[in-house]
Amino acid sequence: MLPRVHRMRDGEVFRQAIRRGGKGVQPDLVVHVGGPVEPTDVTSVGFVVSKKVGKAHDRNRVKRRLRHLMRDRLAVVPAGSRVVVRALPGAAARHSDELGEQLDRALTDASSRIRR
């Protein structure tokens, strides 16, 4: 699981990361990476899984899988970044390996497009 200290919970922080961050798009995921607000900040990650993904148990399963995948990828993004991972409707039908590959590509794209 993703450690609690890395979880994003404030709606305003979500909005800032989405508006000001770089974006990486894949068939089943969209990733926004916002630059660090303070250099000493801890990287935080938030997830958006809408009802279009499926019923509650499907959405929760997708969110758990994405949290697990992001735990191993925290070092990929710049320290102190704000990351928002949005699951698209096809995410529920994908295996973790496929989601991991898409997450890697989206993180790389979004990190390279961070507005400074």
Image (cartoon, rainbow, N blue to C red):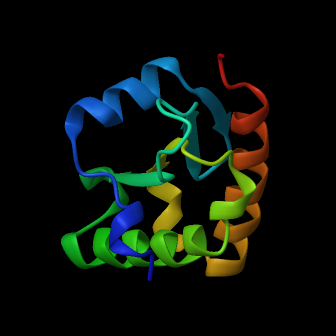
Residue 5: % across, % down: 36, 66
Instruction: Give the answer, above or below, for where 53 lies relative to 94.
Output: above
Residue at 71%, 78% (x, y): give it.
97
Image quarter of residue 53: bottom left
Residue furthest toward the front? Answer: 40
Residue at 67%, 58% (x, y): give it.
103
State the residue in front, 23 or 90: 23
Residue 19: % across, % down: 44, 19
Q: How many marks?
A: 0
Image quarter of residue 45: bottom left
- Is 82 on the left or on the right of 97, as rendered? left
Residue at 78%, 45% (x, y): give it.
108
Position of the C terminus by quadrant: top right
State the residue in front, 81 or 84: 81
State the residue in front, 67 or 9: 9
Instruction: Give the answer, above or below, for where 15 lies relative to 85.
Output: above
- Is 19 on the left or on the right of 71, as rendered? left
State the residue in front, 36 or 92: 36
Residue 51: % across, % down: 25, 54
Instruction: Give the answer, above or below, for where 71 lies relative to 42.
Output: below
Position of the N terminus by quadrant: bottom left
Residue 58: % across, % down: 32, 75
- Is 106 on the left or on the right of 44, as rendered? right
Instruction: Give the answer, above or below, for where 35 lies relative to 47.
Output: above
